Image (cartoon, helix red, strand yellow):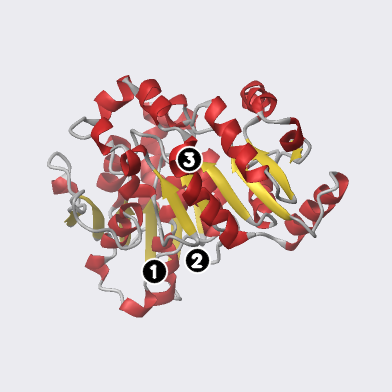
Amino acid sequence: MKILVIQQKRIGDVLVSSILCNSLKKQYPDSVIDFMCYAHCKDVLIGNPNIDSVIILPEKTRKSYLSLFKFFFEIRSQKYDVLIDIYGKLETNLITLFSGSKTKISYYKWYSALLYNHNIKRLQKEEPAKYGQAIDNRLLLLNPLKLDDKTIDPHPKLFVSLKENQDTTALFAEHKISSDKKIVMISLLGSEKSKTYPSEYMARVIDFVADNRDIDILFNYFPSQIEEAKKILDLCSKSTQEKVSFDLLGNDVRSFIAIMDQCDFIIGNDGGAVNMAKALGKPSFTIFSPHVDKKDWATFEDGLQNISVHLSDYKPESINGLATKEIKTIISSLYNEFNPELFKDKLNFFLNQHQ
């Protein structure tokens, strides 16, 4: 059996969607399972033994009708028996149309329903989440294949090579990171401004984490975000700054994964870094943006290993009845209401659990 799983979009989406491959390989160990994603997301799939090939849809191909149609027929030539389209946009609708697959699965959308044999309705927002709706909804896509319950594995996984671990150990030694101390990764900045906890508040969170604790602190940020990262560092107390290895930064996603693998836990903004930490089995304390539905991405929330906070946990009246687009227009004022004092006790509990 040949299976193609398609998930375009961000790193976190791709990582979470890889759970389908993990479960399918358990059920069908002799199957060939390929995964299609954008180039910047492939690093979270490297080393996964449940994925035979990663197929990249290049940006230049997407911008050329001729190249795109050539790509469609390349996919058709692979003769996939099963195609699971998690993304479900025009681009992947067309890939599905030309694929020739016998079994085609995606989420229900009225305008593309005729392209798929199985159109799966997502869970309603008010329905209870077992693992987090981002996970639960993806598992629904396996229903048409009638997998044995014992083969369903809801946990995303990352794989770090021996060389990556050795390189990280050497990097830590170079920066005098002690194995005798807890190492804390701070997810400093979100993927966009509307998903980024205010700098002054984040500095106060970091100060609270560092206060009276013998720890080493690492910051996660992109090189292009260095000025924003420095601003937050400057807002931290002098004693906190002494515990921060500001320049210890992964050059790419793979190096971040290897660094995170040697950290003890992660604290900070929701995003790909937190999802990767969870996939490595690391405890997480996540601060959600007011416009993100916590029910979707607060995955594996158990009050111990994974804890998250959202403005609605403390001031539900601030966003009740507002649509996501409305919340985004007033995101700054809503973030201002989300003072770290609101969740200090919960953060303290988390820290005490993992010290």
- Mark 2 and mark 3 residues within 8 Å of each other at the beta carbon: no
Does residue 55 appear in the picture of this structure?
no
> 301 or 156, which lies in front?
301
When asked about the image quadrant of residue 325, the answer is top left
- Mark 2 and mark 1 residues within 8 Å of each other at the beta carbon: yes
The residue located at (31%, 62%) in the rendering is 139
The residue located at (76%, 36%) in the rendering is 239
Task: Give the mark, 2 or 3, whose residue is nearer the N terminus.
Answer: 3
Query: Which residue is the site of mark 3?
Result: 38
Assign a secondary structure to mark 3: loop
Identity, as a three-letter code, of the amino acid under mark 1: Leu
The residue located at (18%, 51%) in the rendering is 126
> 354 or 169, which lies in front?
354
Assign a secondary structure to mark 1: helix
Image coordinates for residue 61, horizontal then vertical, percent: 45, 32
Quick one: label 3, few (<14), some, or many (20+) residues within 10 Å?
some
When asked about the image quadrant of residue 330, the answer is top left
Counting every numbered tag in the picture gives 3
Image coordinates for residue 306, horizontal then vertical, percent: 47, 57
Q: Distance between the residues labelled 3 and 1?
A: 22 Å
Task: Give the mark, 3 or 1, whose residue is nearer the N terminus.
Answer: 1
Assign a secondary structure to mark 2: loop
Quick one: label 1, few (<14), some, or many (20+) residues within 10 Å?
many
Query: Which residue is the site of mark 2?
Result: 50
Residue 24 is tagged as: 1
Image coordinates for residue 288, horizontal then vertical, percent: 42, 40
Q: Distance between the residues labelled 2 and 3?
A: 19 Å
Identity, as a three-letter code, of the amino acid under mark 2: Asn
> 44 or 323, which lies in front?
323
Task: Give the mark, 2 or 1, whose residue is nearer the N terminus.
Answer: 1
Q: Is residue 118 left or right of residue 174?
A: left
